[in-house]
Amino acid sequence: MTQVIRTALRVEGIVQGVGFRPFVYSLATGLGLGGLVGNDVDGVFAEIEGPPATVREFLRRLEREAPPLARIERVTTSAMPPAGTASFTIAPSGPAGRRRTLVAADTATCADCLRELSDPADRRYRYPFINCTNCGPRFTIVRDVPYDRPLTTMAGFAMCQPCAAEYHDPADRRYHAQPTCCPACGPRLALLGAAGEPLDLGEPLTGDSLGAAAELLGDGRIVAVKGLGGYHLAADAARDDAVAALRARKHREDKPFAVLAAGLAAA
Ligand SMILES: [Zn+2]
Ligand SMILES: [Zn+2]
């Protein structure tokens, strides 16, 4: 009879909102181990059950193969009695308590999302709020921990059926990606005037808020860009009149502004 052990572990660091639970799930199921994994206020907790050598391999690979946005600060383990479970489950998030876990920083759009963004056949083609487990907003949208959608600024956007299917599929890149959305269910672009009135700029810009905003920036206007967490005030950095107007209105005569550039070469 093969000996079976069960090890309780706690992982601390940046381990929420970075695909850590699905990573643990696929690592454990791939090794044929039983147990569970979940989020709580301290980070990620898990219980791993199986032959000692396989559990050791799991622990080795846990740190070595962690998802790209994860930062493991500490893993603590303790032995517990085997429960006789061969299946592996993702436990519901633990109750609220003292908050100690870390939340990842916002991360630039990943290569996979950029590919979908420029693919006319993809349902997120040109959708500005595209993201997945490996990229997108994190810190910006968090209101509380554990990091789950109801505690983010995305709580008000109910997922459509295709988004929900991705969110619940452990094999999908968007499994438990809290800010996931699409043109059918997520935030949309709108162009409003200074008084909040919808701007109708006429042909050929009707319906293209992004293009219209770019046109306004090109004309030296200041555009307030509302994102998932707040506003950016934008002006064409190459136009002295636009930058001067922004400085005057913000009362920032000589303090440097952040400059957005497409890449190092452009900067
Ligand atoms: Zn992505
Ligand atoms: Zn959707």
Image (cartoon, rainbow, N blue to C red):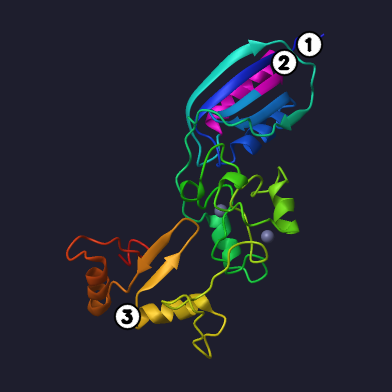
- Crowd tier of the residue under label 1, counting other residues whose Cα lies within 10 Å: few below 14, some 14–19, many 20 or above: few
Dominant secondary structure of the magenta stretch?
A: helix
- Crowd tier of the residue under label 2, counting other residues whose Cα lies within 10 Å: few below 14, some 14–19, many 20 or above: some
* Marking on residue 133: none
Q: Earlier in the sequence, mark 3 or mark 2?
A: 2
Q: Does residue 60 belong to the magenta stretch?
A: yes
Q: CA distance from mark 1 to mark 3?
A: 73 Å
Q: Is residue 175 above or below residue 192?
A: above
* Marking on residue 51: 2
Which corner quadrant of the image does residue 28 belong to?
A: top right
The answer to whether residue 262 is seen in the rendering is no
Q: Which residue is mark 1?
A: 2
Which amino acid lies under the numbered mark 1 shown in the image of this protein? Answer: Thr
Q: Look at the numbered disc 2 and give the secondary structure of its residue.
A: loop
Q: Earlier in the sequence, mark 1 or mark 3?
A: 1
Which amino acid lies under the numbered mark 3 shown in the image of this protein? Answer: Gly
* Marking on residue 220: 3
Q: Look at the numbered disc 3 and give the secondary structure of its residue.
A: loop
Is there a contact, CB below 8 Å, between mark 1 and mark 3? no
**The magenta segment:** 47-65
Q: Quadrant of the C terminus?
A: bottom left
Residue 219 x %, y %: 35, 83
What residue is shown at x 51% (from left), y 45% (from top)? 143
Q: Closer to the camera: disc 1 or disc 3?
A: 3
What residue is shown at x 44% (from left), y 78% (from top)? 193
Q: Closer to the camera: disc 3 or disc 2?
A: 3
Q: Foreground residue, 229 or 183?
A: 229
Residue 109 x %, y %: 50, 56
